[in-house]
Structures are given as structure tokens and as C-alpha cells.
Image (cartoon, rainbow, N blue to C red):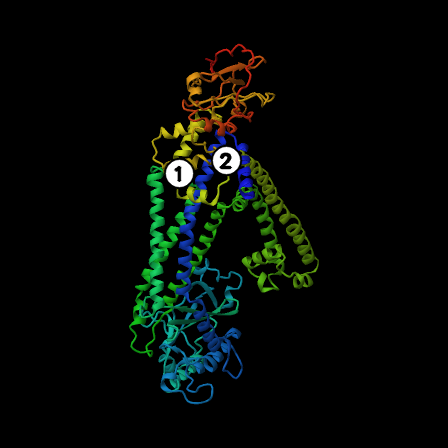
Amino acid sequence: MNYMRSSTRSLIKEQSARSHLIPVDFLVEDLKAKRKFRFLSRKLGSFVTFVAIYVAVLLMDRNIYGRSVARHIVSNALVDTSRAASGITFANINDAGTFWDWLINSFMVVMYDQYDSDGIPKNWDELFTIAAHTRIVGGFHLTQTRFDEVNTTDPANSNDPCFNATYHEFDMACYSNRKESNVSFGYVNYTDEGAAELATLDMFKYSNNATIGIGFQTYFLRSYTGGLAEFKKASLMRAHRWIDRQTKQVSLTMPMYNNNLKIWSIVHLTVDFDLAGGVTPQCKIHVTNIEPYDFKNKKNIIRSILEGIFLGHVIYFFLLELWDICVLSGGSWKVYMARYGFVNNMSDWANILVNFAIVLWRYFMQHNEVRKQMLELESFDKYIDALSLAQWDEVLLAMNIFNMLLLTARTLKYFQVTNGGRRLMHSVYGAMPEIMSFLPIYFAVIMGYTFAGHMLYGLQYPEWSTFFGSLFRVFELNFGLYDPGPIYDSGGYLSATFIYTSNIVFCILMLNVFMAIVMSTWDQLKEEEANKVKDRLRYSKKLSYSDMIHLVMLNEDVVDSLIDVAMDFEEAEEELVTREQFVKAFHELGIDIKPASWERVLEWYWVREESGNSIGKVKPALENDASTKDVMVIKSPRDLDAQLPLAKKEKKPKRASAKVAIDTDTTTIPPIRLKATKTKDEAALKPEADSSPPAAAVPSNTDPPIPSAVAATGSALTNNAATESPLQPAVSEVKVEQDVPQPPAEPPLPADEHVQIHPM
């Protein structure tokens, strides 16, 4: 019972606090906010489903854990460890000598090793395996690109950077990076045997055969003689200087397959030689799955089903955007952009295009010629250049990464469904103009310190030797992520000036200015939000979870029609609107809506009207100083209909003027005191006017018409006599008594537009 009483009191308090006249501007703004909430909530469900399916498909397809294990095993066996007596690893290569030492004494030993880790000879099916499970397919391919040699004394090369006007007579060799050389080369020890031996080595000659490979290249294939011929060939290449100072890059490619995980590992090692004499080794091990639709594996069946659902979502989003443009926006791009916002529309289309690109790329990747050759392999002794397939897979990975970042950015707008998320996003959007005016200053300072650091530390520290490397170091210094100790100790007073000023500018000035911009916008929006909360509490109902679900499931035409009606009042320069005005204007549109749903919509702003013919709606109000002892005596229900003819209430206008604010809660009927005398024949009711001057007539737009059958039964009148009308102040209790002496009759009230009760 206590709960029921408290609930009733809170409901009455909420109803009494809400106004019956709603400002039109508030109504338009609030309805648009509800439409946006409905739009985001509807798209949020499909968006969450889409992201969940997409992430599941991506994780199943990439198989990050299995690929990382395979990659780690291959990298540890071929790159990170060494079989050479010198202990050279791939990362320690710094010249041609160390490259040959690593290749011949470490890499090729691992490939052609015929003994396992216990020193026991391997079985025939264990040869050419890494860590007992990853098989080498065919062997490895070694290629080279070379710098172009330029004659520095030829005036025709005066436009080339190699041309030297100062030392052109010194006859120095100069190599250009503008184009690659295809001239045969090789070192001959000035003997006929050496020249004949060099002529048999095809890797010193440029090949134009696309079947075997283009460029200076050679193959080291699988051998069941322990790789004797391959070791000899590598020694000859070293002796005839296959790598010299004209070498630009050496590339090694080797495909490998793990039958347990059904994945391919393509090892791609490169050694770059720059014109300054530096050597940079780089290792890339691509791991890919060329059999994603092998339905013998149940995992692939599940993933294929999820991919079908993913494709269905992409098509659904595409058709939904076309529907918004062609139907809801009438084919107008301006209406489409104004309806949902430029940023929102562009992000939706970008996501659709990226997803379609992923689907198409995956389709063409499955029809790649290299993949077909790898699937048609009859023996692992045949070499297939799988690097192109690995590059296709890398592009697919990059597209998925970009798509994930785009989905992350799109997720931010769905935070606006909640009040806190909406305030946060509005603070970001509100601060954008000031942030955009601040960013040029910020980037100018960043660029200045980047160039200064690049020139000051570029010669001593590799991380400062390039412009983009210096930019990243300044970015780290901006957020305190870079340790300035080493550069402080080696730079002298210039370094100290650089470090002190950068910390003052970045950590004290720039970051604090940026935070001040964001916080000032946050405080401003917080104050505006507080004002909006007051208006919402005064003019609208706080939506419950069931109301939110009803709003989300509401037809979009109904929501748009509600906004159109509100905007019509706004165009008519109305300031306030009542329930009756809004209902009439909406019904004129002819939109079909269920009565229960329509009543819930009206409850967003107006209190539900009570049903039935309650006596509290028609009883006259008493003055505050009226005595509760003034009563009337009723013998039978027929007395009211027979002896008290009721006057009709004045017809109210169709639409109240918005310029005159009418408070319907204070409108009352002039007080009338009824007294009755009991006669022998029938009871007669006689009105007695108040002795005070008659109150001025105040028209009321909210007084309901008095029903003719208001006194159906005497008991109903007695029980409902104390019921207060929600449109009038509290009135005195009406009691039923008998044999009350009748005072002298007073003159009746003058007839006006109010309800009058005439005596017999």
C-alpha cells in the first residue's frame, strides 16, 4: 500500500508539474531529437550485428594465433639463429662478405640439412622441413637489382646528379638511382678458365624470360645429394662477385607449407645497398591461407555462412542508403544531406564502398593464377613464385585494417544514443571551430622543432636522420614519451635550448591551451544541457524503456508527420500549442496510426485525459472561503434532471492565440451554493447566490461539457462528490443531508456563458 501511495503521489506530482501548453520551438526541437534517437537506435542494432559477424569472419580467416606460431618458427630457424661458425645472423649483415657468410654457412645449411637435432639422419619425408612440420616448396629464388653506371665525363650526362663539373677529369665511376642497369657483369681473374667459367653462370646475365624470371636471378632448388651442386654454385657466385658496389638490392624468396595448419608461409628477405655504402637487411614472412573454402573443414563451413550474412548486410546497407535518397529524400541530395548530416552520410558510403572492395578483392584473389598453380602442385620439388599471392593478401589485410578504423570512427556517433555520449560528442563538435583555428599554430611549432631536431641530431642519431623520423620524435617529446637524456648530453648549449624550450612550449603552453578549449566547450554544453533538462521536465515526459522501444518501432512516416505538424505551427508563428490543436492538425494529414500508439505519442507531452463522465469534471468550484457546511439535499436522481436545467458551455475557438498565455489551471466557475428543502411531494433544489459580488467571467478552454446524465444515480453523486477535477482547484466536499432549513432566497446570478443552475 505504501508503494501504491508513493507511486500515485509521484504520478500526480509529475502531471501537475507538466504544462498543458507546449512551446512550439521546444516541440520541434524535441521531436527532431526523438527522430534522431530512433534513427540511431535502429541502425545501432544492425550495426552491432554487422560488426560482430565481420570481426568473427576476420578472426577465423586470419587465424592470428596459428599464423604467429608458424611465422615465429620459420623466423627463428632461418633468420634469428645462425649455423655459421662466425655466428652471423641475417640482422647482422653489413656488407657483401657477411651476406655470403650467412647465406652459405647458415641459411643453406638449414635448408639442405640431412640430420635432425639429435644427429640422426632424416627420413625422406623429413627432408627440407623446418621444425619437423613446415616444408620447403621447391627451394628459394635469389634475384638482384643494380644501379645504373653513368659516365661523368660525358657532357650528355650533365643533367644527371652523377655529373661532376669539378672532378670530371678524375675518371671516377658514378652510379645513379634513376634507373636500373641490365648490363652483364662479373669479375674475371684475367684467365681463360675464369672467363669460360663466368660464361656458364646465367645469374650474371640479365634475363627477359618471364617464365623463369626477369632480371639477374637464379634458383636454388631441392636436392637429394645434400645440396652439393647448390653449394658449389653459391661459391662461384661469390668468387665472381655477384654482389659488388653496383648492387642495389638482393632479394630471397622461399615458399613453405604447413599441412597441419593448412597455411602457406612465404619468406621474403631483402638486403638493400645504398649509394653511401650502407646495408639494410629486412625480413618479411607472409602467412596466408589459399584454401579458405575447403568445406571438408567444418570451420570453413561456419566461416562461409558468416561471410554470406556479411555480404547480405553490405547489400542491405547499400539498398537502405538508396531508399533514403530516392524515396525519403525525394531524390534530392540536399534533402538527403540535411536529413542525416554530411559526416554521417559520407561515413556510411565510405564503409559500404570499402566492404564492397573487400568482397571484390577476395573474389579476384581466389581466381589468382598463382593460387591455381599452388593448388595444382603435384610435387613439392617444383618451385612456384608465391610472392605475388602474398602481396595480394597484404593488400587485403590493409583494406580490413582501414575498414576496422572506419567502423571505429562510425561507432562514435552511436554513443549519442545516451545522454553522456551525446554531450561528449557535442563537446567535440562544438570545440572543432576553435580547435581548427588552434591546429595551424600547433603544427607550425611542431614543424619548426622537427627541422631543428633533424639538423641538430640527424648526423649523430639514426632516429633523427630522416625528416619523418624527426617528426615522430618531436611527437613523442610533445607527450613526454621520448627520453631527452642522450641528446641533452651530446648537444651542448644548443641541445639544452632545444629541450628546455620544447618542454615549455609543448607541455606547458600548447597542451594546456588545447585542454582549455575542450573544457570551456564542455562547461558551456553542460550549462545548455541543464537548461534543456529543465525544459524537458516541464514540457515532456521522461521516456521509460517501453516508451523507447515504442519510439524505435514507430513508423517513420508517423515520426516525420509529427515533425511536419510541429513545423506548421512554427511557420504560423504560433508560440504555444495545446493537445487539442495538435491532435486536430495531425488528423488532417490522414496518417494511419493505432489509437493506443497515438495515445502513447501524446503522452510524451500531454497528460492522458481521464475517461468516463466523472462528476469531478462538472461540479462547480467553491471559493476558498466557502464553508463546507453549505450542502444540498437530494432525494432522488431524477431531481437534478427534472429541476436543474443546465446551460451549455461556450464553444471554444479552434486554436488559441500563441500571444496570449492562458493558464487553464486557475480558471474557475463562479461559486454557487446549493441548498435543498424536503417537501412532502418532491424535493426542490434552489440555488442561492453568494453574497459577494459576482466574479468576472473568465472563459476557459479546458472546461469539459456537462453531460446530461450526470446524476444517473444518487449513490454515484454521493460517492463522486468529493472527486476533484484535474482542471480546477480543490473544492469543498459536497454532503447529502436532509431537513436542512432553507434561508431566504437570494437573487440568482446573471446569465452568462458559464454553467447556470436555475431553481424551479
Up the image or down, 584 lies above or below 685; here it is below
Q: Nearer the viewer, mark 2 or mark 1?
A: 1
Q: Are marks 2 and 1 in contact (CB under 8 Å)?
A: no
Q: Which quarter of the image is occupied by the C terminus?
A: top left
Up the image or down, 586 lies above or below 162; here it is above
User: Which residue is the site of mark 1?
Assistant: 597
| Circle 1: element type | helix
Between 153 and 560, the residue placed more toward the observer is: 560
Rendered location of residue 318, percent (x, y): 35, 48
Between 382 and 615, the residue placed more toward the observer is: 615
State the CA–CA distance, disc 2 to disc 1.
Answer: 17 Å
Task: Count neighbours of disc 1 (C-alpha within 10 A) and say few if under 14, some if 14 to 19, many if 20 or more.
Answer: few
Between 179 and 653, the residue placed more toward the observer is: 653
Identity, as a three-letter code, of the amino acid under mark 2: Ser
The disc placed on residue 436 is: none
Q: Residue at x 53, y 81 (%)?
A: 87
Rendered location of residue 393, percent (x, y): 39, 64
Outermost residue, bottom side: 120
Q: Is residue 758 left or right of residue 453?
A: left
> In the rendered image, is residue 28 in sight?
yes
> In the rendered image, is residue 399 in sight?
no
Q: Residue at x 41, y 46 (%)?
A: 42
| Circle 2: element type | loop
Rendered location of residue 349, percent (x, y): 39, 48
User: Which residue is the site of mark 2?
Assistant: 540
